[in-house]
Amino acid sequence: MGNLGFQEILLIAIVVLVLFGGRKIPEFMKGLGRGVREFNDAKNNVRKEIEEGLNEKVETPPATPTQQSASTTTTMQP
């Protein structure tokens, strides 16, 4: 059922041509191309940010825990 043959594709193309006309199809395709380009740009930006975040996490050494000084600790007396 998922396979489209030549006749089905031709029928779909004719229906699209009749519905939208010859002038609207180039505009539609131009808009579709812009949308695909913007989607790919956004996808690449997200991938780049994730990779940069992972690289920063790997490159930075783990923080050493700070030692508490004796003057800041308090003892409770009964």
Image (tube, rainbow, N blue to C red):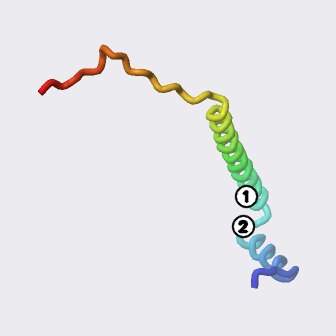
Q: Is residue 75 left or right of residue 43?
A: left
Q: Which residue is mark 2?
A: 20
> On the picture, is 6 further left or further right than 26?
right
Q: Which residue is mark 1?
A: 28
Give yes or no for contact between labels 1 and 2 (Cβ–Cβ under 8 Å).
yes
First along the sequence among labels 1 and 2: 2
Please state the horizontal and vertical placement of residue 20, each as a whole percent of the image.
72, 67
Query: Residue 19's image quarter?
Result: bottom right
Cα separation between marks 1 and 2: 9 Å
Place of residue 77 in the rendered image (x, y in percent of width and height, measured from the top left): 15, 24
Q: Percent position (x, y) of residue 34? A: 72, 49
**How crowded is the residue under tag 1: few (<14 C-alpha within 10 Å), some, or many (20+)?**
few
Furthest residue in direction front, as rendered:
78
Q: Quadrant of the N terminus?
A: bottom right
Disc 1 marks a residue whose amino acid type is Phe
Q: Is residue 68 above or below residue 3?
A: above
**Kind of residue at badge 2:** Phe
Residue drawn at 42 percent across, 21 percent down: 67
Outermost residue, left direction?
Answer: 78
Look at the image and tell me in which quarter the C terminus lies: top left
Q: How many marks?
A: 2
